[in-house]
Amino acid sequence: MNHLFQNNDFDPSKLFSSQDQSVGQRMLRGRWTGVSAFRSVKAREAHLRGVAGCGPMWAIDFSNGITDVGIHFVLDRFSNVGAPSALTWYAGLMDNAGFTGVASADTALSHTGWSESVAYDESVRQTLAFSAASARAISDSVSFTMNATTTVKGLFVISDNTKSGTAGTLFSTALFVTPPALVSGNVLTANYSLSD
């Protein structure tokens, strides 16, 4: 059975659609707002003072595109390839039992809508050992060897490897469309990728 992830970037229109796990349609999106042109410096100053009839000739908002080298720069630093001060990231499992929801305000210490499942053999959360960014993306795979009967609601990415730990930065959560019911000895594998 194929268990897809919901794209959980806290956009309700995406939260309930079946899509592969990602950080959203674009991890980074810049936007220029209030770009405007005035006839002269004096006209701009008059507009700032609130003088009627001295507004801009035009004003627009527009998005920008991130270059390949730009996105690779950010991804490499996120993944600890490009900077020694970057964090190492780990994957953990979300328990289906008692699940009520995820929220953009969730943190490692406080995520009242869900709990972590530690029903796997590995002694720590699994390391996401990203390699250098390529083709505007980074990715890595993790595996969990189940040691009990459990249903996994989803996965999360965090900067602390301690099972049930409440320290570190909770980066993201992702939910299965259909949570898989697993038994002891099953191995859950997952690939996590970040791209623009």
Image: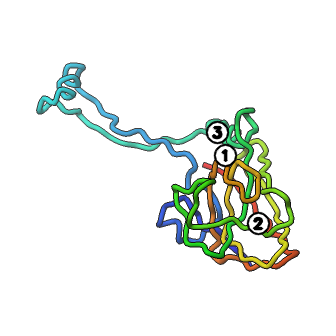
Nearest the viewer among 29 and 16 is: 16
Q: Within 10 angstroms of label 3, few (less than 14), some, or many (20 or more) residues?
A: some
* Relative depth, front residue between 95 and 37: 95
Circle 2 Cα neighbour tier, 10 Å, few/some/many (<14 / 14–19 / ≥20) = many
Q: CA distance from mark 3 to mark 1?
A: 10 Å
How far apart are labels 2 and 3 at the CA level? 31 Å
Disc on res. 74: 3
- x 77%, y 47%: residue: 130
Q: Is residue 67 above or below residue 195?
A: above
- Label 2 element class: loop
Query: What amino acid is labelled 1 in the image?
Result: Arg
Residue 46 placement (x, y as % from top left):
17, 24
Q: Which mark is residue 136?
A: 1
Identity, as a three-letter code, of the amino acid under mark 2:
Val
Residue where numbered disc 2 is placed? 118
Whole-percent x, y for residue 52 in the image: 11, 32
Instruction: Name the element at disc 1.
Output: loop
Residue drawn at point x = 56 percent, y = 57 percent: 106
> Mark 1 or 2, which is nearer the eye?
2
Quarter of the N terminus within the rendering: bottom right
